[in-house]
């Protein structure tokens, strides 16, 4: 590989040279793109379901950046200014789902806060495109130092490295200020002291803003979401904690008996399983532990609690008033429900698909929800194969559309050979149980 580094190359270009510079630039570009998808989507609820908007803006910006790399003036060092503008806009004009605490119990009428979608999304698109133009230019200038095939090779390696780096940071549930800190370190490696003071100041301001965000009461990060918790007591003895993920109402944590008063569907599977010994119970979507506590209260001798998000399960372990995860009869598995079923030989007296809802856990660009893999004939068949002879399968959710209830009931009919028991509680709540 021949690397072009002349004696006239500015000193900052020799901090990292050749292939290392290209790999670092590519890694930084992918890392920032993923960080923007994660952070912007967590604070601007419209982007939680339209993260492909950020992808499109990023692709446009990167393309423009590669075109700009043909020019003599390097604007890459000023890229942090675009990042600061984006962070400032979303910080001062966030959007989340609003509703009173009583609304959150039932997840009924919800209203997005913040600026209108038609204002927020175009502005975010433009700012991200401009920002990613800078990162594209940094990579493009390093790219042009190689022959095409060699450049593509090191670019791909760098892109993979950036993706892996972001995956590790997310897996560790790092707070949001880690992302701009990594970005600053990478920019320093690329430019050294030649990084303009305004860019250094911009990165410091971004880090400070996200440190402030991370220190806010009730804010934490899971591998998938920004998680907000808030405790309510509506003038009664009933205290409950709401959980929002990426600005969307997700779960409530409260005493299981109080839960049954407002949401009786939680208790219906056990009414259908009268006479069943409940030696082994499997709960897919165990969340903060409401269904686990209810299974224990109904005499379950052992419960396998499967929850894909470790932070949601941890919150339940810490604040659920019934302390279900402290019970020695409970085994916790941080896993996808279908993957768990494929890896166990245990037979269960009750299998419960309890409100599985990934919200934005899968990128909006995929047009999929992770729980879609649970609502298939193959998944229902896998659950049936893990039932005892007298076992019960049950599932419930806030199904708003009759056609969806009919579709799921039809799938269960095909798997079990007879129509399921179907209970409707309100216009938006239903439960299907099969014995």
Image (cartoon, grey):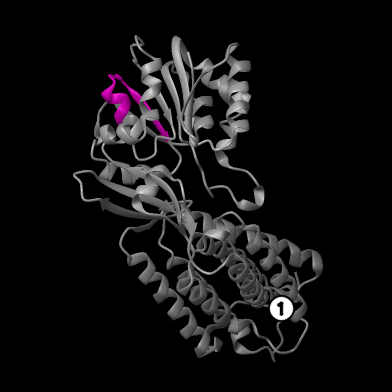
Quadrant showing the N terminus: bottom right
235 lies left or right of 280: left
Is 327 rendered above or below residue 121? Answer: above
Q: Position of residue 141 (x, y in %)?
A: 71, 78
Q: Position of residue 80 (x, y in %)?
A: 55, 79
As drawn, the residue found furthest toward the left would be 237
405 within the magenta span: no
As drawn, the residue found furthest toward the front would be 427
Is 280 rendered above or below residue 244? Answer: above
What span is colored magenta in the figure?
Answer: 293-306
Q: Position of residue 173 (x, y in %)?
A: 42, 55
As drawn, the residue found furthest toward the bottom would be 8
148 lies left or right of 407: right
Q: Is residue 311 visible?
A: no
Q: Which of these two is toward me, 362 or 156?
A: 362
303 within the magenta span: yes
**At 28% from the left edge and 52% from the top edge, which residue is drawn?**
231
As drawn, the residue found furthest toward the right would be 148
Secondary structure beneath label 1: helix
Q: Quadrant of residue 118?
A: bottom right
The residue identified by callout 1 is 141
Q: Is residue 192 visible?
A: yes
Q: Quadrant of residue 73?
A: bottom right
174 lies left or right of 198: left
**At 74% from the left edge and 81% from the top edge, which residue is drawn?**
68
Q: Position of residue 198 (x, y in %)?
A: 51, 88
**At 40% from the left edge and 21% from the top edge, which residue is drawn?**
269
């Amino acid at each position: 590989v021949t690397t072009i580094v002349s004696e006239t190359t500015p000193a900052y270009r020799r901090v990292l040279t050749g292939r290392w510079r290209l790999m670092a630039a590519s890694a930084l570009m992918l890392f920032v793109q993923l960080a923007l998808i994660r952070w912007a989507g967590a604070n601007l609820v419209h982007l939680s379901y339209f993260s492909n908007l950020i992808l499109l803006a990023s692709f446009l910006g990167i393309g423009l950046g590669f075109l700009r790399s043909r020019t003599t003036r390097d604007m890459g060092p000023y890229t942090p200014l675009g990042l600061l503008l984006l962070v400032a806009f979303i910080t001062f004009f966030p959007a989340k789902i609003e509703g009173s605490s009583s609304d959150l119990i039932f997840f009924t009428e919800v209203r997005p806060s913040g600026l209108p979608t038609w204002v927020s999304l175009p502005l975010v698109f433009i700012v991200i495109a401009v920002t990613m133009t800078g990162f594209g230019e940094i990579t493009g200038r390093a790219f042009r130092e190689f022959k095409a095939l060699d450049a593509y090779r090191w670019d791909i390696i760098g892109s993979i490295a950036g993706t892996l780096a972001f995956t590790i940071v997310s897996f560790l549930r790092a707070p949001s200020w880690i992302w701009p800190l990594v970005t600053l370190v990478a920019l320093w490696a690329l430019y050294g002291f030649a990084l303009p003071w305004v860019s250094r100041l911009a990165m410091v301001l971004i880090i400070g803003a996200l440190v402030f965000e991370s220190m806010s009461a009730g804010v934490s990060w899971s591998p998938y979401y920004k998680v907000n918790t808030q405790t309510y007591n509506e003038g009664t003895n009933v205290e409950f904690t709401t959980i929002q993920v990426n600005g969307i109402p997700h779960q409530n944590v409260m005493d299981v008996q109080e839960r049954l008063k407002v949401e009786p569907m939680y208790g219906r599977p056990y009414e259908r399983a009268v006479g069943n010994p409940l030696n082994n119970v499997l709960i897919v979507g165990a969340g903060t532990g409401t269904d686990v506590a209810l299974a224990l209260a109904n005499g379950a001798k052992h419960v396998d609690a499967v929850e894909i998000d470790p932070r949601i399960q941890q919150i339940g372990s810490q604040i659920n008033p019934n302390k279900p995860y402290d019970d020695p009869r409970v085994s916790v598995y941080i896993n996808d429900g279908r993957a768990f079923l494929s890896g166990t030989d245990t037979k269960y007296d009750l299998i419960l698909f309890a409100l599985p809802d990934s919200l934005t856990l899968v990128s909006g660009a995929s047009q999929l929800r992770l729980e879609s893999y649970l609502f298939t004939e193959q998944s229902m068949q896998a659950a049936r194969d893990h039932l005892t002879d007298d076992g019960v399968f049950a599932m419930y959710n806030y199904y708003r559309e009759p056609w969806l209830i009919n579709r799921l009931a039809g799938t269960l009919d095909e798997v079990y050979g007879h129509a399921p028991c179907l209970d409707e509680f309100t216009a938006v709540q239903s439960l299907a149980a099969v014995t």
